Amino acid sequence: METYSLLREFADSWFMLAIFAFFLGTVAWALRPGGRRQHEDAAQIPFRHEDQPARDDALAASADNLKEARQ
């Protein structure tokens, strides 16, 4: 059996099964009961600093350098 045929047979059977198992594991991990808080936190990222941008460590000392987010 040549290399191409062997790799093709492996990809058609066992590798497909491994990818499907990885997919099911990923879906189960994303929908686990303990992940709800993390998903809600990630969903609120765009709304965290509506009035002004987040302070940068270098700019935290002077409030004059902050710009208003809404114009």
Image (cartoon, rainbow, N blue to C red):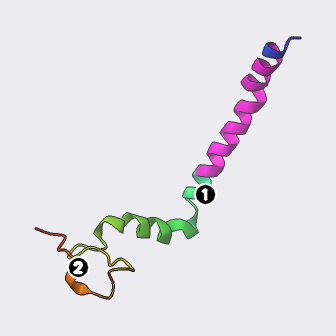
Which region is colored magenta?
5-26
Residue in front for this viewpoint, 59 or 27: 59
Q: Amino acid at mark 1?
A: Trp
Spot the residue most to the bottom: 61
Residue at image point 69% right, 42% down: 21
Q: Quadrant of residue 58?
A: bottom left
The secondary element bearing badge 1 is classed as helix
Structural crowding at the residue carrying mark 1, measured as other residues with C-alpha within 10 Å and reported as few (<14), some (14–19) or many (≥20) = few
**Residue receiving disc 1:** 29
Q: Is residue 33 magenta?
A: no
Of mark 2 and mark 1, the one earlier in the sequence is: 1
Q: Is residue 9 left or right of residue 33?
A: right
Q: Give the quadrant of residue 40.
A: bottom left
Image quarter where the C terminus lies is bottom left
How far across and how far down the image is residue 46, in percent? 31, 65
Residue appearing at x 58%, y 50% in the figure: 27
